[in-house]
Image: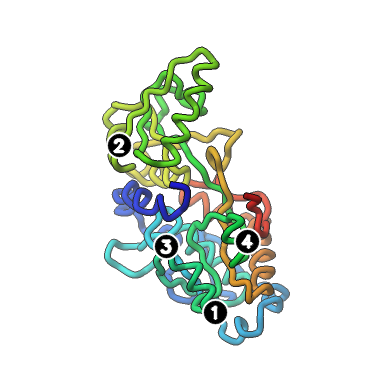
Amino acid sequence: MNTRLAHRAAAAAVATTALMSLSACGGDDSAPKAAGKVSVAGVKIEKDQSLHDMLPEEIKKAGRVRVATDVPYPPFEMFVKEGGSELTGLDHDLGQALGGKLGVAFVFTPQKFDGIVPAIQAGKFDVAMSAITDNRDRQKVVDFVDYSQSGSGILVPEGNPAKITTLDTLCGQKVAVQAATNQLDLLKGHQAVCAKAGKGKIDIQTFPKDSDAQLALRSGKAVAQVLTKPAAGWVAKTADDGKAFDLVNDPEAPGGYNASPNGIAVSKELPELTDAILKALQALLDDGTVAAIYDQYGVASIAVPKATKNAAVD
């Protein structure tokens, strides 16, 4: 499973319980906001006229950016209420912040993930914000403004009784993981490191779903669970009101192990929009808005320090 699509169902399942405790974290409706009157994560965002002027004429005339997103994929994209249509999530909140800075509305529309890029190519959407991995193949048909990096993370019971701090400290321990995932491959690949260090092998406990692995962690059958870091951060933030689990933050892997960049995909027909979003994102990084948004979803560490364009090199 090497793509965001492959992890969609797993991430949705692992956070089902967490979603029940969501109380509109971003405080924003999915409907368009008035330009220059946006508040996200407690931050009031004002329109920057110079950035607005960079936008393509058709975007300025429409007053909106059409955004494709695949829902749910916690914590990036979620519904405020199960069965409802109102959106929330990291991508949605970031989109509202970018819209506020640019002086246009970012209007999100659910779209199946595998149809997102073709829909942009067909002109149905201007951009996509859906935790899309920036890679060279996708760069051939869309441009990316990179806003986060995400890989595998480690979830532990609250208080971290086994004192897990890195992958190395998993050696000799029982670790829960979903079968047939990048995270399972990561653990298998680390067995050689454990052996070289003279430590015991990781006792890998595989489960059909991430949620099953989480139950094993709750019951003490494992000392840690390895899953995508954004999902791990969200579960740690929300499960039992944040009292069930902790997220391990390895300073050597702030975005997670084997992290890759996530990008806002922009139509190649709208290069001015790409440049405007890039500069708007940097402004939101500089003033702390991005940090505030990411922190409310428990994934502050996956934020990039600098906005980049088409950062992936493989």
Judged from this view, the residue extending furthest toward the right is: 50
Mark 2 or mark 1: name the one nearer the start of the chain. 1
Q: Which mark is residue 207?
A: 2
- Front label number (4 vs 1): 4
Q: Position of residue 277 (x, y in %)?
A: 64, 67
- What residue type is disc 2 on? Phe
Name the element at disc 4.
strand
Marks 4/1: CA distance? Answer: 18 Å
Mark 4 or mark 3: name the one nearer the start of the chain. 3
- What residue type is disc 1 on? Arg
Residue 219 lies, with reference to residue 87, above or below; the image says above
**Number of labelled discs?**
4
Judged from this view, the residue extending furthest toward the top is: 198
- Front label number (4 vs 3): 4
Marks 3/2: CA distance? Answer: 29 Å
Name the element at disc 3.
strand
Name the element at disc 1.
strand
Dot 3 alpha-carbon crowd within 10 angstroms: few under 14, some 14 to 19, many 20 or more: many
Q: Residue 287 carries which label?
A: none
Q: Which mark is residue 64?
A: 1
Marks 1/3: CA distance? Answer: 18 Å
Q: Where is residue 24 in the image (x, y as percent from the top left)?
A: 39, 61
Mark 4 or mark 1: name the one nearer the start of the chain. 1
Residues under numbered marks 2 and 1 in contact, where contact means CB atoms less than 8 Å apart: no
